[in-house]
């Protein structure tokens, strides 16, 4: 898909655009960012979820993450989940869960593509779901789709940027 196939793209820079009306919107998401190169076309989509008010334990955000993970697993099969508090973090108590995300010392994500048993279509290289912080008491989920043409797209955009040097 080329940039012309997107409805009202708002340029963000380096081949990234915010689109207001995606072809297939989902009610869990409020914004969509795409990466498009002139020759390679559309190579990456990020769906950004709505803010979810949550406790310091992050239960509500984790629940939204797990619900979307179940939906994506129903479509794409097996995945690998990473729920990690980085070594040395002081945010290691259960009620520090959100602060760990805010301080970038915790990660909650799921990936399809590399996992044995994933059943992605040939044009999709990977799908990634993550829980993200908005503040200590709110967060959102994101879903990123990387297409098979992403390496050529990235190279094309990097070459364009290097032309400015």
Image: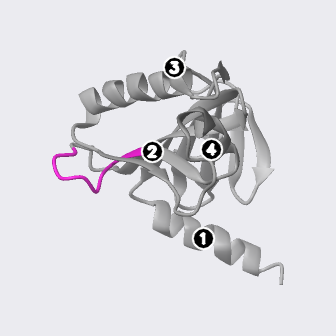
Mark 4 crowd level (few <14, some 14–19, many ≥20, 10 Å Cα) = many
Q: Is residue 148 above or below residue 62?
A: below
Mark in front: 3 vs 2: 2
State the residue in front, 94 or 84.
94
Mark 2 crowd level (few <14, some 14–19, many ≥20, 10 Å Cα) = many
Q: Which residue is mark 3?
A: 26
Q: Position of residue 128 (x, y in %)?
A: 44, 45
For the record, the magenta segment spans 109-118
The disc placed on residue 109 is: 2
Work out how far the residue at label 1 is from the one at label 2, CA to CA, in angstroms. Answer: 28 Å
Q: Is residue 96 left or right of residue 134?
A: left
Image quarter for residue 154?
bottom right
Could you tell me which residue is drawn at 64 percent across and 28 percent down? 56
Mark in front: 1 vs 4: 4
Q: Which residue is mark 1?
A: 156
Mark in front: 1 vs 2: 2
The disc placed on residue 101 is: 4
Question: Would you say residue 49 sits in the magenta stretch?
Answer: no
**Badge 4 or badge 2: first in the primary sequence:** 4
**Badge 1 or badge 2: first in the primary sequence:** 2
Q: Secondary structure at mark 2?
A: strand
**Badge 1 or badge 4: first in the primary sequence:** 4
Q: Are marks 4 and 3 in contact (CB under 8 Å)?
A: no
Image quarter for residue 46?
top right
State the residue in front, 151 or 57.
57
Q: Which quadrant is home to the C terminus?
A: bottom right
**Badge 1 or badge 3: first in the primary sequence:** 3
Work out how far the residue at label 4 is from the one at label 2, CA to CA, in angstroms. Answer: 12 Å
């Amino acid at each position: 898909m080329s940039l012309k196939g997107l409805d009202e793209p708002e340029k963000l820079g380096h081949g990234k655009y915010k689109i207001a009306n995606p072809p297939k919107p989902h009610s869990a998401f409020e914004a969509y960012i795409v990466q498009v190169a002139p020759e390679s076309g559309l190579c990456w989509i990020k769906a950004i979820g709505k803010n979810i008010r949550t406790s310091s334990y992050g239960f509500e955000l984790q629940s939204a993450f797990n619900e979307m993970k179940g939906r994506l697993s129903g479509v794409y099969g097996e995945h690998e989940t990473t729920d990690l508090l980085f070594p040395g973090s002081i945010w290691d108590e259960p009620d520090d869960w959100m602060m760990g995300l805010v301080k970038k010392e915790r990660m909650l994500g799921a990936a399809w593509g590399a996992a044995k048993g994933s059943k992605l279509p040939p044009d999709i290289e990977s799908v990634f779901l993550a829980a993200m912080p908005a503040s200590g008491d709110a967060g959102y989920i994101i879903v990123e789709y990387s297409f098979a043409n992403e390496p050529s797209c990235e190279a094309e955009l990097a070459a364009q940027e290097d032309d400015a040097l």
